[in-house]
Image: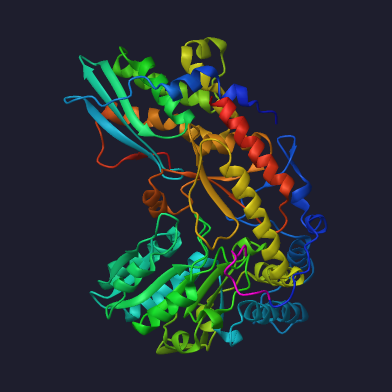
Amino acid sequence: MSRDLNELYQSVILDHNKTPRNFHELPPPASHADGHNPLCGDRLTVWVDVEDDTVKDVAFLGNGCAISKASASLMTAAVKGKSRADAMALADEFQKLVTGKLEGAAERKALGKLQALAGVSEYPVRVKCASLAWHTLKAALAGAPAEPITTE
Amino acid sequence: MALAASASPPRRPAAPLDVEAVRRDFPILSTRVNGKPLVYLDNAATGQRPLAVIEAVRRSMAEQNANVHRGVHTLSEQATLAYDAVREDARAFLNAPAGHEVIFVRGTTEGINLVAQSYGRTTLRPGDEILLTTMEHHSNIVPWQIVAGQTGAVVRAIPITDAGEVDLDAYRSLLGPRTKIVGVVHISNALGTINPVAEMTRLAHEAGAVVVVDGAQAAPHTAVDVQALGCDFYACSGHKMFGPTGVGLLWGRTELLDAMPPWQGGGDMIHTVSFTGTTFAPLPAKFEAGTPAIAEVIGLGAAIRYLRGIGFDAIGAWEHALLERATALVSAVPGVRLVGTARQKAGVLSFTLAGVHPHDLGTILDADGVAIRAGHHCAQPVMDRFGVHATARASFAFYNTFDEIDALVRGLHRAREVFA
């Protein structure tokens, strides 16, 4: 198996880790959900402000590794302005990307900057780091459950 | 055990450890990971297995496999003899007064659960207190929380200092007539602290409490002597002692074990069974229901004999040298904060590196074949105490080398460059 650290830690990821975008709370009426990866202790909260079925604003706060932080940051930039259904669909496409199941070049290209996280697929134990924010987003879009979303 | 200077003088000079010869006993140490020689610094999670253990398990499965304590045929007799012989190896390893006081369990976790559910559940009353140090592994916290919920007892935490040592003054003031059980980890998996178990036990006994010791990290690195410690229960895990997974030891005092009800029912733990009533087998069978982990127990016996062959004087001296070098070199890396700086420490180095999350550090080190642990180490109260979410942890065994510590330090510098 050949795994290249530079593929995993691309400059886009390092940048979003150091300077996460939309890294703050959103005031009500934005809804939010909490995500937790119990194995490693990563925790984050995702806020979404949906108006007329469109993600008007999205933000997050939390603690985690560079992969989870960059993934959350890139996610907020990617889903802002999308319809609820498109955001949900993007979450599914992203999950395919980081698990190495995204086949076509066109599908990959449609993910834009999120492609920076494709290298995660070579690191099975790090997939949860990348997907935590997206699971949490889906919960926030669906209406926050009482229990935190976990990757287990 | 990497004992600091205040330990009593060694009984005899330790024969120096021939680390290269020892490494040849462990096949996995000559493998490569990601194209690089494996540098295994995750020994607190699990130890590697020497050929002696691998061969003992193989022989048990390939040549001696039969159920124990049941058949009259030759294979069963051989398996039973090999299995039962390990009881004496384990007794001697812990310096227990009697072999029947040593119960084979699945590991430390099961040993502590057994004590909690058998001893704790039948003796604890509402308002009774269970004292646990803040540096306990979850396996010495959660079983007590469960039994506290069942009995109305209360779990209280013994504070630790900024260095990661038990605050003995606070411990003294927590002890009282309500204290029934004290749980203490012999060596902390997250901090490396070697706790003053004998002193803590003396104080607990003055208050009338029994002491349960989590020996998971101590048994692979130090000569355990349950009589010198004075404790009442001691649990350890085979896989951390370079033996197989799925097997461990629970030692308890005869008078306590005799008075305790069985924890699980089944075959091998009974004297007679009828639908009007059942009488239980004497120790240790009373606590060993069902077919045991036969090959694993036999493998654990081989691990104990292997450790005895090297000797804990030699192991302790070498691991102390490894810890001193690693502490000096790692703490000199800019941005490193050590978590756990007790005066008495075993070969565990827990730390954070500014700007690099421990998981990312773990991945970067792994690219160079260096295996460490990153996370909360199943000791979340310790993380909370030190105000961190996770740490990176390098943990050493007697087969580690100075070169491997240098590889760790090179990896730390590389991580700083990646995240610069």
Quadrant in which residue B390 is drawn: top left
Quadrant in which residue B118 is drawn: bottom left
> Image point 47% across, 80% down: which residue?
B232
Q: In the displayed structure, would residue B204 be above or below residue B45?
A: below
- Specify the principal SS of the magenta part: loop
Lateral position of residue B54 relative to residue B267, left or right: right
Q: Is residue B268 visible?
A: no
Lateral position of residue A78 relative to residue B68, left or right: left
Quadrant in which residue B208 is drawn: bottom left
Lateral position of residue A126 relative to residue B223, left or right: left
Please name the colour scheme applied to the rendered image: rainbow
Q: Position of residue B200 (x, y in %)?
A: 43, 75
| Residue range corresponding to the magenta coloring | B1-10
Q: In the displayed structure, would residue B189 be above or below residue A133?
A: below
Lateral position of residue B182 relative to residue B340, left or right: left
> Image point 69% across, 71% down: which residue?
B304
> Image point 31% across, 36% down: which residue?
A34
Of residues B413 and A128, the one drawn nearer to the viewer in this rendering = B413
Q: In the displayed structure, would residue B58 be above or below residue A59?
A: below
Q: Quadrant of the C terminus of chain B?
A: top right
Of residues A126 and B67, the one drawn nearer to the viewer in this rendering = A126
Q: Position of residue B239 (x, y in %)?
A: 62, 61
Count the labels in the image. Answer: 0
Magenta stretch holds residue B238? no
Q: Position of residue B296 (x, y in %)?
A: 66, 67
Q: Quadrant of the N terminus of chain B?
A: bottom right
Q: Is residue A47 visible?
A: yes
> Image point 58% across, 87% down: which residue?
B97
Q: Position of residue A84 (x, y in %)?
A: 29, 18
